[in-house]
Every structure is written in C-alpha cells, then in structure tokens.
Image (cartoon, grey):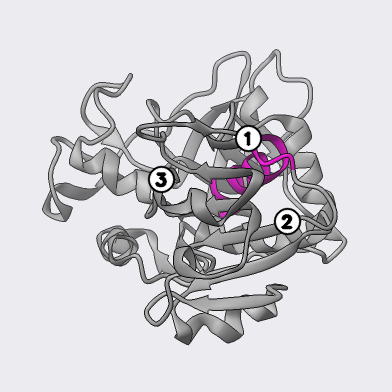
Amino acid sequence: MKAVLINKYGHNNVVEIKDLSRPKPGPNEVLIRVRAASVNPVDWKIREGMMGAMSEPFPIVLGRECAGEVAEAGAAVKRFKKGDQVIAITDVRRPGYFAEYAVAPEQTVYPKPLNISFEEAAAIPIAGLTALRSLRDAGEISAGKKVLVIGAADGVGHFGIQIAKVLGAEVTAVCKGANTDFVKGLGADKVIDYTKEDFTKGSERYDIIFDSVAKRTFEECRSVLTPNGIYIRTLPNEGATEEGGKKAKTVPGGPTPEDMDWMKARIEEGRIRVAIDKVYPLDQAREALAYSETEKARGKIVLKAA
C-alpha cells in the first residue's frame, strides 16, 4: 500500500511516498480502507519535530484523521463490520492515516454521516470537534450570547461559526476581507476584516472570544470581553488566565463518541456543512502540507487516497 511517511524530522523534503505492507488489526482494532485523510497544521508540526517524540519509531506515517470503509474487523470488535463507512481519529503521538490502509482502535472509530463524501467526512474529527468542545464546554455557550471567532475562515473557525449559530449565539467573524462572503454563507452575523480593523480597539463586547488560530492573547482580548466573558485558545494560554470574572481557557479534554454523534446529527440535518478548499491525491502530500503552512486555506485541505 502507498503511505506518506518521514524517516527524520525536517521540512517538506523529508516527506516520502513509499510502499508498505498492509497493517493487520488486533482483536480490538479495525482495518480501514482509507478513502480520504484530512490535512491539519499538526501534521506539518509533527513532520518538523515540533510535537516532541512520537510513540512510534521512524518511519512515521503522517496523518491523524481519515474516512473510509472497514476492510477487516478484529475478533473483539462489536460496533463495526466489513464494509461499514467510518471516520477515525488517532492520538497526536501515533499518527498513521496518510495511507491507503490504516489500523484504528474501535473506540476511536465513528460512523460516517450519510449525506456527505469521504473527503468531507475526513475533515470533521479534529477541526469540528475542537470547535464544539471549545464553544460548548470551555465557552459555556448558550442562546443569545455574543461570540467572536478569530480565524473564522479556517478549518476550525468555519466549524466554530456554524456550531455557535446552531447553539443560538450571535457571531462576529474575524478574517480577511476576501473571505467575507464565505463566512457570511456559514451564518456569521457580522464580519471584521482584520487587515483594516483591530477588534480589540472596538466598542463591541463579547461573551466568548474563540481564537481558533491562536493568534491573539488573553491580555490583548480581555478589554473587549464582557465582565464574565471567556477567551478560548486552541493552544495553551500563556500568562494570566483570570482577571475578575473574565477567564482564559483552552480546548478541554478529547473527542468522545457523544461529540461525534452530535456533529453527525447536525450534518445530516443540513445545519452544519464541511467546507473543503482543496483536494490533493495522496502522492501530492508535500504540496498539501505546503499549502496548509501558508495558512490561506478556506475551510479544510484533504488528501484523496482512492
């Protein structure tokens, strides 16, 4: 099978496309025939060695989320059978989904929404569930709250807009002016072009500021939070995390089956959609990673394995 791997850390020149033996599932694992795998910033950060030591030795197959069909189920697997269409996510220390086949523990595999493609499905776990947990769990979002989403046109941010709207919030999107129509199409009530306006100097106050790209800090944002407002960052916060009633938080915990069920239901209802910017064939993984590094993607970047 084809796989995208590295034998050392570095830039895109260390990325290789190699033929590897098809992995075999253990008793509690499923073997997935990968149809599509989503590209995330964490993938090129792993490539660079920025995530620390991996659980697996070199060569390391990249990729943390995928969608495809169950090719084989381990003897103890109860929820899935051969032919089921599924989504899988793996731990940051054990990537391996930029390949034609991948093994996943049963507990990290979920049914694919019925009304979307494999390419769209592969893009849900990291970005979609990060946005959900950030807004619902860390942000304590509720109907009527004012939410500001920084990086609103990117992979996590575009889910954040939609999730906030589903949960009844008023959403202001922060992005480049060129993405105004895109974020409004996702439900944003207001748009701030960050190349022309700094929201931290404005008069509007927000109950939740969701920094999906970790470009600002709590210190910069707290003046435009309401008295009990919450600033949420997708990377760990530095410095103070509380001032009066205002708090800075990061994404809590990890994804659960209940989180994926919530997303699946809203996607199948047509209330949340997955925006795909570009789809690359598996053997163009270098190009896909390079594009991710530009931080210009509108929505998600995906590798098509078959």
| Image position of 155 (left or right of 162) | left
Mark sitting on residue 219: 3
- Choose the circle earlier in sequence order: 2 or 3: 2
The amino acid type, in three-letter code, at marker 2 is Ile
* Quadrant position of the N terminus in the picture: top left
Residue 33 position in % (x across, y down): 55, 44
Q: Secondary structure at mark 2?
A: helix
Mark 3 surroundings within 10 Å by alpha-carbon count, few (fewer than 14), some (14 through 19), many (20 or more): some
Residue 291 position in % (x across, y down): 31, 67
Q: Which is nearer the eye, 73 or 205?
A: 205
Mark 2 surroundings within 10 Å by alpha-carbon count, few (fewer than 14), some (14 through 19), many (20 or more): many
- Choose the circle earlier in sequence order: 1 or 2: 2
Mark sitting on residue 163: 2
Range of the magenta residues? 122-140
Q: CA distance from mark 1 to mark 2?
A: 25 Å
Mark sitting on residue 245: 1
The amino acid type, in three-letter code, at marker 1 is Gly
Count of residue discs: 3
Residue 72 position in % (x across, y down): 63, 31
At a point 66% along the width and 63% down the height, the residue shown is 161
The amino acid type, in three-letter code, at marker 3 is Glu
